[in-house]
Amino acid sequence: MLSHINVFTRGREAMEDITHRVNDLIRRSGVEEGVCYLYLPHTTAGIVINENADPSVSRDILDRLEALVPTKGSYHHLEGNAPAHIKSTLTGLSLTVPIDKGRLALGRWQGVFLCEFDGPRDRTVVVQVLPSHDAGPGETVEGRAGQP
Amino acid sequence: MLSHINVFTRGREAMEDITHRVNDLIRRSGVEEGVCYLYLPHTTAGIVINENADPSVSRDILDRLEALVPTKGSYHHLEGNAPAHIKSTLTGLSLTVPIDKGRLALGRWQGVFLCEFDGPRDRTVVVQVLPSHDAGPGETVEGRAGQP
Amino acid sequence: MLSHINVFTRGREAMEDITHRVNDLIRRSGVEEGVCYLYLPHTTAGIVINENADPSVSRDILDRLEALVPTKGSYHHLEGNAPAHIKSTLTGLSLTVPIDKGRLALGRWQGVFLCEFDGPRDRTVVVQVLPSHDAGPGETVEGRAGQP
């Protein structure tokens, strides 16, 4: 039930749209209704849902994060990527999205993005798909056990 | 299992307390213990849990977000609402909250807020309620199947 | 299924690593594969996953949050902890992490931190562990009910 999406990010900073790849995994799972968990096992990247119609929105997000957490600031961590760790904290790395009709129940303008803050690199997104159980298990059981 | 809460937000920016409406949905679901997923299918709004006792906390949150992402800044996205997209990224749009005794297991001072950054508008919150299964389904089944 | 971790935070601001304690709860639950929900019922603290190898990353996160939301700023909320409420909103208080092989499926450098913004204090983290059901419950039921 743990699936992985591998993404090679294309710049030092980048927003990589992974919406279609998540929907592919959901389709293969056969789940029509439920929830999809997206988890990033990294510390210098984030996962975000925002507009995927106009790519300038992604640029504005990266630019503003850079204004808030400047690369040329003063940091304790000596590997040079402290700002990437902080940006990851601000964007987050765990999302839960409803599944409806066999796909992510995204809003009209929404896409799922892996946000790279310290690339280019190979990244992994962990995807879990959980079907919803409309009937509680007890109900299901009784119905079936009644037909021995 | 996918329920929706419709909210008309009352200003260009606003924090709308939806705690009672989420608890109403949980009560109607009959779930006593489990988790509640809250998901916002929008790109210029956020969903946040914070203090709902003193409304000045909500004002401070909105004011500080405006200081960090000023409306009068310079952005690539030309629709004029780039700051709203960025604020949505900073606050997030997906929450998972435990359910206990048939309601959100919130802390004493907590409320759930839809954060409007580009209103006034009609907004929707997607709510999913998942019961927890203390006993694995196998265990439940065996107990019941043993009483034919 | 609702478990709690109690943490006494050691400063006005602090990042407390709770990774081992969450893994202890998962081990005791016996769940090998599933998801772990972490929820903070507070309004002046956050919960974050980031690097736990070099403690200077935690210092950088706290320092940058202070630069973005200065303690000596001007706020409406009169209890003196408005910045802590805002930092909590920026970091978030709800996480969902996959469980694999009986523990959090964290990345190599990741740890789970309670972020204190208004301490020192006693804090609580609510932990829920949900097993994944590879086979739907119906399938499990039929298999077992077939052996009366």
Image: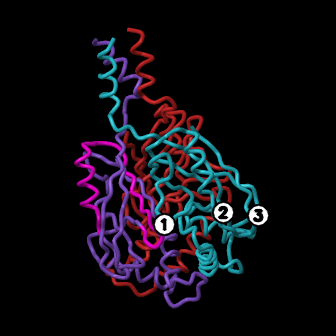
Chain colours: A cyan, B purple, C red
Which residue is disc 3 drawn over? Answer: A120
Residue B88 x/y as whole percent: 48, 71
Q: Closer to us: mark 2 or mark 3? A: 2
- Percent x, y of residue A25: 59, 45
Whole-percent x, y for residue B84 in the image: 48, 78
Q: Are marks 1 and 2 in contact (CB under 8 Å)?
A: no
Image quarter hosting the C terminus of chain C: top left
Q: Label 2 amino acid?
A: Glu
- Dot 1: few (<14), some (14–19), or many (≥20) neighbours within 10 Å? few
Q: What residue type is labelled 1?
A: Gly
Name the N-terminal-most of marks 2 and 3.
2
Label disc, if present, on residue C147 of the rendered structure: none
Q: Which mark identifies residue A16?
A: 2
In the displayed structure, A65 sits above or below A30; it is below
Give the Cα separation between the discs numbered 1 and 2.
38 Å
State which quadrant residue A88 falls in.
Answer: bottom right
Pointer 1 and pointer 2 on the same chain: no
Q: Is mark 1 on a helix, strand or loop?
A: loop
- Residue at mark 1: chain: C
User: Which residue is farthest top?
Assistant: C148
Q: How many marks?
A: 3
The residue lying toward the viewer, choosing from C94 and A82, is C94
> Secondary structure under badge 3?
loop
Q: Residue C11 carries which label?
A: 1
3D distance between C-alphas at marks 2 and 3: 11 Å
Residue at screen point 40% across, 49% down = C126
In the image, which residues are magenta?
B17-46
Q: How crowded is mark 2: few (under 14 residues within 10 Å), some or many (20 or more)?
A: some
Instruction: Name the residue type under label 3.
Output: Pro
